[in-house]
Image (cartoon, helix red, strand yellow):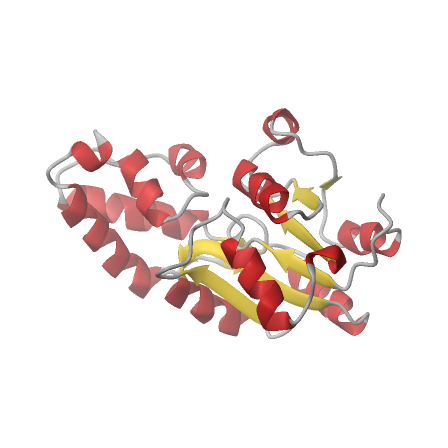
Amino acid sequence: MCDRKITTVIFDLDGTLLDTLEDLKEATNYALRVCNMPERTLEEVRCFVGNGVRNLMIRAVPNGERNPEFERAFRIFKEYYGLHCNDTTKAYDGIPELLQELKSRGYTLAIVSNKIDSAVQDLNCRYFPQVDVAIGDCENLRRKPEPDSVNLALEKLHKTKQEAIYIGDSDVDLATARNAGLPCISVLWGFRDKKFLLEQGASIFVESPMEIVDILSNM
């Protein structure tokens, strides 16, 4: 598929490694209820995620940032999600085994996410001891699809983009990989379907985690 020697695998978090959708929906709807706004369905929240939690709430709150109650709703969301980000969240089936297999084969692993950095660090510590570096939404770091978090992960790992690959589930991940100059594997168990991803330019797909090992072995 390419002639580069892959040593480093960079993962998105939500929708790729972790099924976080239910907790995101609950935090969104808690904030909306408190602010007397209409709640959102799971499928609506699924479409809203991917560009960070502020953008999630911009899409969930009627009239977004133009709503005079937006900042209050966003603050309530962050407070609630900070306390409840792990209520129903779980690793997708096969993900722990995938990470262990990649680690045993000598790959360096990283996570880059638009989720609040404190939540990324917490969830990474809970679920993924194999991951060497995890980076979330931080001050002075542009969110994905800008390549900043990918570049920072590579810098921390002392790796180059020529030896890295990106794995995610969304159009934002495809754009992030493109902007960072990395090939991208799109997973089909996450928040976007294959038809949508094809329309966004995806070309490498996996339906189960261990397929990633086979793809990397043939690169």
Q: Is residue 135 above or below residue 175?
A: below
Q: Residue at x 21, y 29 (%)?
A: 63
Image quarter for residue 158? Answer: bottom right
Asked whether 181 or 22 is in front, the reply is: 181
Q: In the rendered view of the protein, which quadrant contains the N terminus?
A: top right
Where is residue 99 shown, x and y percent of the image?
69, 65
Query: Left of 216 or right of it: where is 48?
Result: left
- Residue 133: x and y in percent read 57, 70
Measuring from the top left, give residue 215's x and y in whole percent.
82, 49
> Is residue 128 visible in the rendered structure shown here?
no
Residue 20 is left or right of residue 99, and the answer is: left
- The one of 80 and 108 positioned closer to us in this rendering: 108
Image height check: is 13 above or below 190? below
118 relative to 156 in the view: left or right: left
User: Residue at the spot x=35%, y=42% of the render?
Assistant: 56
87 vs 28: above or below: below
Q: Quadrant of residue 6?
A: bottom right
**Residue 192, quarter of picture:** top right
Q: How many marks?
A: 0
Residue 175 horizontal/vertical position (percent): 57, 39
32 horizontally vs 201: left or right? left
